[in-house]
């Protein structure tokens, strides 16, 4: 995944900040940041506003600078909450690595096909499918598909294929789909699924992402 860049600012100020890079997230210690300019030692013990610019938009939170290591990396407290300042229109969230999570395609005549979610947005989804499992012509409609995790499933979702390309393995293909004439329920369940995955990833609780999905029982 792409690295998140941003800045640290004294609380209540929007200028006078210093540029930082998020090196990693350590659930046991906190955020590990690399300072680009300025003195990290001067920030130890201070409360700061952290503004992050990542692939999905811009977020802000409050954090405390806890310590600095011999590499010049700062450890800060994990934020209690994130304020979303700006979000990219229709940004995509990578699917979770969850063997129990599938998007099930209804192929007609009682036939169903399990697919994996590569990424998801509020209006579309990219699926990983076994090569030659079904037709994947651009413009083809899939009606009545649904998210499924163990015994929980969403309501029916209609899709239209917008693109396809080779998958990560020779026997796989990736298919980009857009929602077809979605109603309010479909839009809610798509955004609920996307935001549940994204929020769990930010909170380092991706193994329990499904608890935030509206359709999960």
Image (cartoon, grey):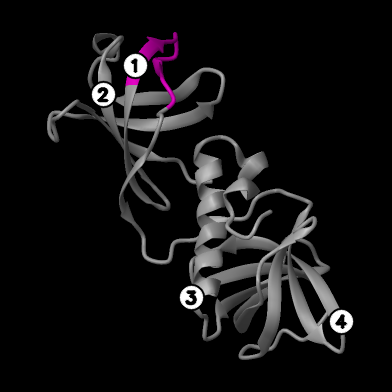
Q: Per the image, is 91 magenta?
A: no
Q: Nearer the viewer, mark 4 or mark 1?
A: 4
Label 3's element?
helix
- Residue at left 70%, top 76%? 145
Q: Which of marks 2 and 3 is in front?
A: 3
Residue count near mark 4 (Cα–Cα under 10 Å), binned few <14, some 14–19, many ≥20:
few
- Residue at left 40%, top 25%? 33
Q: How far apart are marks 1 and 3 (CA)?
A: 43 Å
Q: How far apart are marks 2 and 3 (CA)?
A: 40 Å
- Please provide the residue range marked out in magenta: 64-78
Total marks in image: 4
Q: Nearer the viewer, mark 2 or mark 4?
A: 4
- Residue at left 56%, top 65%? 189
Q: Mark 1 points at which residue?
A: 65
Q: Do the residues labelled 1 and 2 touch (CB within 8 Å)?
A: yes
Residue 132 visible, this orientation: no
In the image, residue 30 sits, relative to residue 82, either above or below, namely: above
Q: Mark 2 points at which residue?
A: 48
Q: How far apart are marks 1 and 2 (CA)?
A: 7 Å
Q: How far apart are marks 2 and 4 (CA)?
A: 55 Å
Q: Do the residues labelled 3 and 4 touch (CB within 8 Å)?
A: no
Residue count near mark 2 (Cα–Cα under 10 Å), binned few <14, some 14–19, many ≥20:
many
Q: Upstream in the sequence, badge 2 or badge 3? A: 2
Q: Name the residue under label 3.
A: 184
Q: In the image as oriented, which residue stretches furthest toward the front? A: 217
Q: Upstream in the sequence, badge 3 or badge 4? A: 4
Residue 111's disc is: 4
Q: Upstream in the sequence, badge 2 or badge 4? A: 2
Question: x, y (%) of residue 12?
Answer: 15, 29
Q: Upstream in the sequence, badge 1 or badge 3? A: 1
């Amino acid at each position: 995944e792409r690295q998140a860049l941003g800045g640290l600012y004294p609380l209540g100020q929007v200028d006078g900040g210093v540029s930082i890079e998020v090196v990693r997230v350590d659930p046991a210690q906190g955020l590990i940041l690399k300072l680009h300019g300025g003195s990290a030692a001067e920030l130890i013990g201070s409360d700061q506003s952290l503004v992050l610019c990542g692939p999905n938009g811009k977020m802000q939170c409050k954090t405390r600078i806890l310590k600095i290591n011999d590499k010049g990396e700062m450890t800060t407290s994990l934020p209690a909450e994130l304020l979303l300042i700006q979000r990219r229109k229709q940004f995509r969230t990578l699917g979770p690595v969850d063997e129990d999570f599938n998007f099930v395609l209804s192929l007609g005549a009682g036939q169903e096909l399990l697919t994996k979610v590569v990424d998801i947005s509020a209006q579309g989804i990219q699926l990983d499918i076994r090569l030659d499992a079904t037709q994947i012509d651009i413009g083809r409609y899939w009606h009545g598909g649904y998210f499924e995790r163990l015994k929980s499933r969403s309501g029916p979702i209609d899709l239209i294929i917008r693109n396809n390309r080779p998958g990560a393995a020779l026997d796989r293909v990736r298919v980009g789909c857009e929602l077809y004439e979605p109603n309010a329920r479909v839009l809610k369940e798509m955004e609920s699924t996307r935001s549940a995955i994204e929020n769990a990833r930010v909170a380092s609780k991706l193994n329990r992402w499904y608890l935030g999905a509206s359709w999960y029982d």
